[in-house]
């Protein structure tokens, strides 16, 4: 009896490295000059390797026999990349392969991610300042737009933030981007940073269903969240723009649950959500639907695994590193679905292939390509304890 073959081919580690490097070199046009000792492939191979390994560019090049000079790579990063180009090309990169995987209707999530800055207080120009968090008020800050499909998250855009940016300006940019994509948006889930009248006005103007956790601004809403059981109320916020003022009225779903010792808390927990979505009818549904966005935090945890170690404050380099880190996740999901999953009646079968394994495979391929040092000098031969 013969066993049916489960796969027709294989993807090897070096091919994963090639896929990522080719994706980057095909997107960014770098002119290095006739006398340059390296080419764009060399630069992006180092970037992908450092990203997968979670190390610095200098460290990776220093410990690799076939890597270009770390000084040369960093020089070209400083001189050959433009912030606006990285921003626009980066978003096209993130969307390129994953858009074909998305169904016609998706849920989208907009979130802010703050990476603390602990450097010289006199060198925070261009950074984003916010309330004190994790011992600092200065951050490398990024807004991200994700599509959520069946508990999977696909990054569609990332935007660097600096002082002067507002939640409404970021949301307006992302909503405009969504209008240009061939997607039907079922709902938009925002974090509490976007709870203000301008953001809610934008959502109404684009006719998007939404769920946003409310902030306890004002005595009226504070009172509502201190008493009573689950219910729906009407609330409003005053807002304005360019000298014009208006009031935005919206439903607030107040969901109440017993803590029952969760997080060592007892009593009743009350959470309010600004909601305008036809498929949400009760406060508990509002909480359930909104809880889906918390999966976004796992995307950040995955991104931390593929972040180049750096102390630079250069906004262009840091945005490039963030784009590549998020590209790793999109590439893994795309390759998993398009190449690893087995087509079958009733839907594809997703064979086990974790993001962690994907990272390890790319890391080993980069180590091999760059000939990373696998031994250290010793002042005497290893003894029997080093043998098996």
Image (cartoon, rainbow, N blue to C red):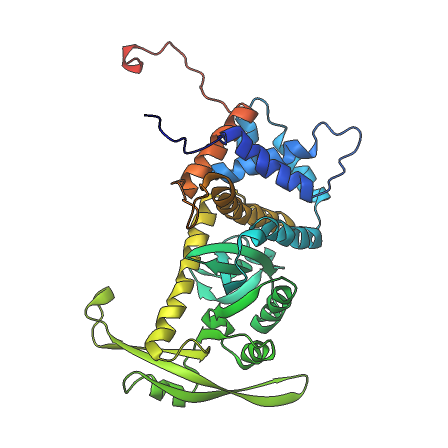
Q: Is residue 213 above or below residue 332?
A: below
Image side of residue 88 versus residue 266, left or right:
right
Q: Which one is nearer the viewer's eye here, 243 or 72? A: 243
Instruction: Write down the quadrant of residue 99 in the picture.
Output: bottom right
Instruction: Write down the quadrant of residue 256 in the picture.
Output: bottom left
Q: Residue furthest right?
A: 34
Expressed as whole percent of the image width and height from the top left, the position of residue 227 reads: 28, 87
Q: Residue furthest front?
A: 1
Expressed as whole percent of the image width and height from the top left, the position of residue 28 reads: 69, 43
Image side of residue 96 versus residue 290, left or right:
right
Expressed as whole percent of the image width and height from the top left, the position of residue 212 reads: 45, 74
Q: Is residue 66 above or below residue 378?
A: below
Q: Which one is nearer the viewer's eye here, 112 or 205? A: 205
The answer to whether residue 313 of the structure is visible from this angle is no
Q: How many marks?
A: 0
The residue shown at (55%, 31%) is 15
Q: Is residue 96 above or below residue 180?
A: above
Image side of residue 231 versus residue 187, left or right:
left
The residue shown at (23%, 72%) is 259
In which quadrant is the C terminus drawn? top left
The answer to whether residue 200 of the structure is visible from this angle is yes
The residue shown at (62%, 54%) is 91
In which quadrant is the N terminus drawn? top left
Q: Which one is nearer the viewer's eye here, 81 or 120? A: 81
Expressed as whole percent of the image width and height from the top left, the position of residue 94 reads: 59, 51
């Amino acid at each position: 009896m013969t066993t049916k073959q489960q796969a027709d081919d294989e993807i090897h580690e070096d091919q994963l490295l090639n896929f990522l490097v080719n994706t980057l070199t095909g997107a960014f046009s770098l002119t290095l000059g006739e006398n340059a000792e390296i080419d764009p492939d060399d630069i992006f191979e180092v970037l992908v390797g450092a990203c997968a390994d979670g190390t610095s560019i200098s460290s990776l090049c220093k410990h690799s026999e076939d890597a270009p000079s770390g000084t040369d790579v960093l020089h070209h990063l400083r001189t050959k990349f433009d912030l606006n180009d990285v921003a626009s090309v980066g978003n096209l990169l993130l969307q390129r392969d994953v858009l074909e995987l998305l169904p016609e209707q998706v849920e989208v999530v907009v979130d802010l991610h703050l990476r603390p800055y602990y450097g010289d207080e006199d060198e925070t120009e261009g950074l984003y300042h916010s309330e004190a968090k994790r011992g600092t008020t200065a951050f490398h800050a990024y807004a991200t737009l994700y599509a959520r499909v069946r508990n999977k998250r696909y990054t569609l855009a990332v935007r660097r933030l600096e002082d002067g940016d507002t939640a409404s300006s970021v949301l307006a940019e992302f909503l405009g981007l969504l209008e240009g994509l061939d997607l039907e948006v079922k709902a938009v889930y925002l974090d509490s940073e976007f709870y203000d009248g301008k953001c809610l006005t934008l959502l109404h103007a684009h006719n998007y269903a939404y769920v946003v956790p409310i902030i306890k601004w004002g005595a009226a809403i504070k009172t509502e969240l201190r008493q009573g059981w689950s219910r729906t109320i009407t609330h409003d916020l005053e807002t304005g723009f360019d000298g014009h003022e208006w009031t935005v009225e919206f439903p607030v779903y107040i969901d109440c649950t017993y803590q029952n010792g969760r997080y060592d808390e007892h009593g009743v927990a009350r959470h309010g959500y600004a909601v305008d979505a036809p498929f949400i009818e009760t406060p508990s549904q509002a909480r359930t639907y909104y809880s889906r966005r918390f999966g976004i935090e796992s995307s950040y945890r995955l991104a931390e695994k593929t972040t180049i170690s750096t102390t630079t404050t250069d906004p262009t380099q840091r945005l490039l590193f963030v784009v590549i880190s998020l590209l790793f996740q999109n590439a893994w999901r795309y390759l998993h679905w398009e190449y690893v999953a087995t087509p079958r009646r009733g839907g594809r079968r997703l064979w086990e292939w974790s993001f962690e394994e994907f990272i390890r495979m790319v890391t080993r391929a980069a180590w091999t390509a760059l000939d990373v040092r696998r031994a250290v000098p010793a002042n005497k031969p290893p003894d029997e304890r080093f043998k098996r």
